[in-house]
Image (cartoon, rainbow, N blue to C red):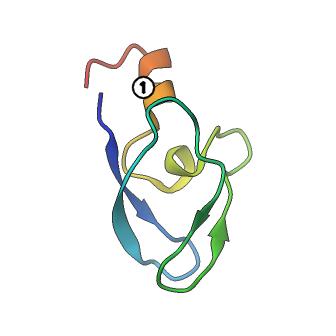
Amino acid sequence: MQTRSVITCPQCGFAKEETMPVDACQHFYTCSACGARLTPKEGDCCVFCSYGSVPCPPKQIEAGCSC
């Protein structure tokens, strides 16, 4: 399972590597560059699934990922 993901702000394009929680989905994220408060896109469980380079650990487990 991967616990690091690069999250990219859709407002300003700033990208930052973050550690994802392993036991929950993260519903909010504040961009450290522009201050935008990100929420998941419709149909996604968390901001990492919407804006990250790797889906969140709960989704990885659900998909049977052997990351």
In what element is the residue under mark 1?
helix
Give coordinates of residue 43: x percent, y percent.
71, 38
Residue kind at label 1, given as amino acid type: Gln
Which residue is situated farthest in the top direction here?
A: 64
Give coordinates of residue 8: x percent, y percent.
44, 66
Number of residues whose C-alpha sits closer than 10 Å to that of mark 1, classed few (under 14), some (14–19) or many (20 or more): some
Q: Nearer the viewer, residue 65 or 31?
A: 31
Task: Please determine whether, in this image, residue 38 is positioned above or below residue 59.
Answer: below
Return the residue at label 1: 60
Q: Quadrant of the N terminus?
A: top left
Which residue is situated farthest in the bottom direction here?
A: 34
Residue at the (39%, 13%) spot, across then down? 64
Residue at the (33%, 40%) spot, across then down? 3
Task: Please determine whether, in this image, residue 35 is positioned above or below residue 1.
Answer: below
Residue at the (61%, 44%) spot, across then down? 46
Give coordinates of residue 41: x percent, y percent.
68, 51
